[in-house]
């Protein structure tokens, strides 16, 4: 057990270092550069479009990734199972890309092609990290994130020459996919040959994808709702207000990856008492994260986004708290997934969506940014508490 814990600790460190590098470059270099060159209004529109791309990637790419992790442990699986699923998502990306631009009066053939390619490569990037998590090779996962980061830095040169922010972001996704092509076997032949468990795997991947879709819509709802009902500049305001909390909480992602890798790779026994203790630790950590987020936001946003600091500072506490509770409940959800199956995760996220729709959508329309921030905090805290209660209920008694 000590060896497992030691290896898990090393894997968490590699994952955190990779995400620290990637998110550091994105948040400290790439996005501030976009904001400086585009202005708050145009940057807000770019954030809106990127939110739709992120929804597609984190829903269907991550859904395929987690489904394959579970299948690797419990069933047979093959590249063809998930390649066929990805083809369906690529087709779906055509109308999604079109309406994302059309509804915001941003449509052009050139931008449509850029956003479509960015969308499908983002879905692939979210999915392909399973190459490393499935075999518990987190050193290579670190290099995967390095490739993604290098691509985004190179993309800045593309932006400086062409003025295309979408082409700049695309280059990062492309570098990550190329890295997997040369280091793994997930992009090798046979491309469409399926396993004996194809039907079970497809059921699993769609249930998880729909569940992730619900969660991703809520996570990215701030940009979509604000752009639709308040304004483009206000998208930038709220994005910067919640940014530090989102950055801090995003470091739960490597923890999630390690958790699911070890839960599927080792027969780890989890009791009600252990899960309750883990939940208590998560709550304490969330309070620490929230306090840290508010303190750092007052420094970071003032330096990196001075044009919106005065407006954004009023939302630092509520906006960051909402982000922290969302991401930490995701870590608990990964554990619940292992012991309750995909359907329970979907049920939790549907309950979360109902609370979100009742509170946040009307709140944004009536009260603007204040209503959005409050609604997100309450609905994300609800998800956190419900996940804990369901986890305790379904774990072993002793």
Image (cartoon, rainbow, N blue to C red):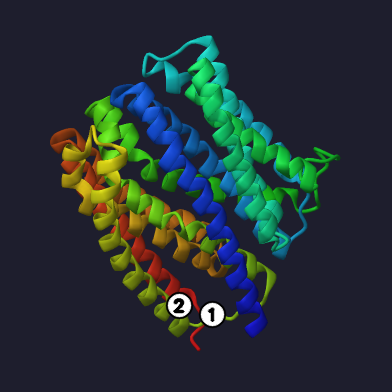
Q: Residue furthest bottom?
A: 398
- The residues tagged by marks 1 and 2 sit, at their Cα atoms, a distance apart of 7 Å
Please tell me whether mark 1 sits on a helix, a strand or a loop.
Answer: loop
In the figure, is residue 183 to the left or right of 35? right
Task: Say which quarter of the image contains residue 94.
Answer: top right
Q: Position of residue 132 (x, y in %)?
A: 69, 56
Task: Tell me which label, 1 or 2, sits earlier in the chain.
Answer: 1
Residue 270, which numbered label? Answer: 1
Relative depth, front residue between 226 and 26: 26
Residue 324 in which image quadrant: bottom left
> Do the CB atoms of the residues marked 1 and 2 lie less than 8 Å apart?
yes
SS for callout 2: helix
For the point 48% across and 38% down, the residue is: 54
Q: Position of residue 358 (x, y in %)?
A: 24, 45
Q: Nearer the viewer, residue 378 or 293?
A: 293
Query: What is the number of the mark on residue 275?
Result: 2
Number of residue marks: 2
Give how far across and how far down residue 392 sits, in percent.
42, 76
Comparing 349 with 291, the one in front is 291
Asked whether residue 30 is in view, the answer is yes
Looking at the picture, does residue 387 appear above or below residue 376? below
User: In the rendered view, would you say 348 is above or below 280?
Assistant: above
Mark 1 closeness class: few <14, some 14–19, many ≥20 residues within 10 Å? some
């Amino acid at each position: 057990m000590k060896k497992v814990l030691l290896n898990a600790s090393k894997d968490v460190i590699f994952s955190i270092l990779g995400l620290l590098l990637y998110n550091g470059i994105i948040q400290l270099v790439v996005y501030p550069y976009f904001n400086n060159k585009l202005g708050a209004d145009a940057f807000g529109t770019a954030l809106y479009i990127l939110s739709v791309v992120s929804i597609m990637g984190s829903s269907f790419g991550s859904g395929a990734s987690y489904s394959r992790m579970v299948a690797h442990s419990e069933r047979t699986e093959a590249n063809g199972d998930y390649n066929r699923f990805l083809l369906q998502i690529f087709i779906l990306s055509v109308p999604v890309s079109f309406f994302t631009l059309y509804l915001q009066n941003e449509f052009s053939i050139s931008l449509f092609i850029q956003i479509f390619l960015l969308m499908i490569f983002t879905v692939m990037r979210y999915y392909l990290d399973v190459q490393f998590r499935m075999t518990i090779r987190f050193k290579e996962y670190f290099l995967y994130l390095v490739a993604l980061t290098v691509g985004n830095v190179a993309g800045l040169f593309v932006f400086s020459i062409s003025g295309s922010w979408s082409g700049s972001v695309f280059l990062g996704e492309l570098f990550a996919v190329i890295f997997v092509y040369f280091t793994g076997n997930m992009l090798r032949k046979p491309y469409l040959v399926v396993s004996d468990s194809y039907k079970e795997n497809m059921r699993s991947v769609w249930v998880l994808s729909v569940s992730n879709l619900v969660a991703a819509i809520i996570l990215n709802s701030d940009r979509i709702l604000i752009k639709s009902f308040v304004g483009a500049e206000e998208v930038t305001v709220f994005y910067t207000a919640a940014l530090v909390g989102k950055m801090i909480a995003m470091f739960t992602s490597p923890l999630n990856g390690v958790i699911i890798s070890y839960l599927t790779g080792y027969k780890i026994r989890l009791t009600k008492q252990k899960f309750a203790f883990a939940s208590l630790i998560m709550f304490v950590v969330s309070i620490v994260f929230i306090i840290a987020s508010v303190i750092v936001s007052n420094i970071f946003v003032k330096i990196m986004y001075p044009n919106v600091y005065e407006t954004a500072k009023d939302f630092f506490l509520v906006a960051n708290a909402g982000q922290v509770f969302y991401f930490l409940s995701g870590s608990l959800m990964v554990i619940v997934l292992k012991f309750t199956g995909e359907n329970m995760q979907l049920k939790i996220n549907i309950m979360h969506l109902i609370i979100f729709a009742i509170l946040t959508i009307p709140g944004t329309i009536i009260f603007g940014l204040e209503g959005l921030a409050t609604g997100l905090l309450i609905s994300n805290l609800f998800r956190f508490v419900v996940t804990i209660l369901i986890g305790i209920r379904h774990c072993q008694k002793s």
